[in-house]
Image (tube, grey):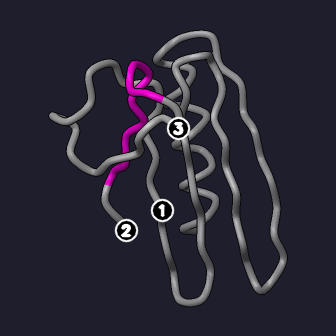
Amino acid sequence: MGPLTWRDEVSGWPHRIVADRNAVGVPESVGIRLQRGDDEMEIVVWTGGWAYVIVAIDGEVRNLCPGFSDVDAAYAAVARRVEDFLA
């Protein structure tokens, strides 16, 4: 598992992506990268109500973009993708 990364909504263009949450004025997204052997998963959850999810398993890349309407739905969408990846 890699470190969490944050994108700052109020920083100048291009928006900064940093690992230090304290360096972010207004978080616009949070991201993480998981690795299991040669397989990888990258997740970025956006405040706008969706998540950017890329999974590379056995050389096949899949792009999954779950949507959600609240924090509980966001958690459920991302947790489901992570559980599938680790299974």
Marked residue nearer the N-terminal end (2 or 1): 2
Which residues make up the magenta segment? 4-12
Q: Amino acid at mark 3?
A: Pro
**Quarter holding residue 68:** top right
Q: Position of residue 49 (x, y in %)?
A: 62, 18
> Is 57 above or below relative to 7?
below
Residue drawn at (67%, 42%) of the image: 52
**In the drawing, does residue 48 fall left or right of residue 11?**
right
Coordinates of residue 84 in the picture (x, y in percent) = 63, 58
Q: Do the residues bearing badges 2 and 1 touch, measured as CB atoms within 8 Å?
A: yes
Q: Considering only vertical position in the picture, is 64 above or below 57?
A: above
Q: Which residue is mark 3?
A: 14
Q: Considering the image in quadrants, where does the N terminus appear?
A: bottom left
User: Which residue is at 57% across, 20% downward?
Assistant: 73
Question: Which dot marks residue 55?
Answer: none
Instruction: State whether residue 59 is above or below residue 77.
Output: below
> Which mark is in front, 3 or 2?
3
Percent position of residue 37, x then y: 53, 89
Q: Is residue 24 above or below residue 61?
A: above
Q: Residues within 10 Å of mark 3 (few under 14, many from 20)?
A: few
